[in-house]
Image (cartoon, rainbow, N blue to C red):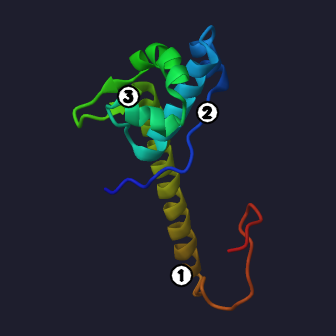
Amino acid sequence: MKTKRLSFIPWYTSDFAGATRGWCGCARLIYRELLDAQFDMGGLPNDPEQLRRIVQLDAACWERGWQTVAPKFVVCDDGKLRNLRLEEHRERAQQLSQRQQQAGKAGAQARWQRHSKAGSDPGSNSTPQADEDGFVL
């Protein structure tokens, strides 16, 4: 089954704040920017210079912060760097999205079957009817 790309993932501000409390501003910025980039790209290059360009920092700020952030990312089998916790959140979000998609399809199928049994075509221009929740079918 093809996995659709997620457009968002929940952001847990208190988790981020707790995990980065006491870090310098450069480290916090690097961490957030790399998490966002990983989410968009699926993985990060295993090259500090490319990472520095992704977060668009000067070399001095990068050096100050990267030492703190580096342990939060691991090299995966494909050679890309990833934060494993973000990948866990991505997996849960994908599962939720799939469940919602399946529920939507099941609901549409049930509505279609109700209309078919009643002898009406839900795509026709007949007078719309509302279901028990007030939604027009």
Pointer 1 residue? 116
Mark 2: which amino acid? Trp
Find numbered disc 3 in the image and state the secondary structure of the residue it sits on. helix
Q: At 45% from the left edge and 51% from the top edge, which residue is drawn?
A: 98
Using residue 107 as the reference point, say whether residue 86 is left or right of it: left
Percent x, y of residue 27: 55, 19
Task: Farthest residue to the bottom: give it.
Answer: 125
Q: Is residue 121 above or below residue 16?
A: below
Rounded to the nearest angstrom, the CA distance separating label 2 from label 1 is: 43 Å
Using residue 71 as the reference point, say whether residue 1 is left or right of it: left
Query: Who comes first in sequence, dot 3 or dot 1?
Result: 3
Label for residue 73?
A: none
Label for residue 11?
A: 2
Marks 2, 1: nearer the viewer: 2
Q: At 47% from the left edge and 18% from the top edge, which residue is drawn?
A: 63
Mark 3: which amino acid? Pro
Find numbered disc 2 in the image and state the secondary structure of the residue it sits on. loop
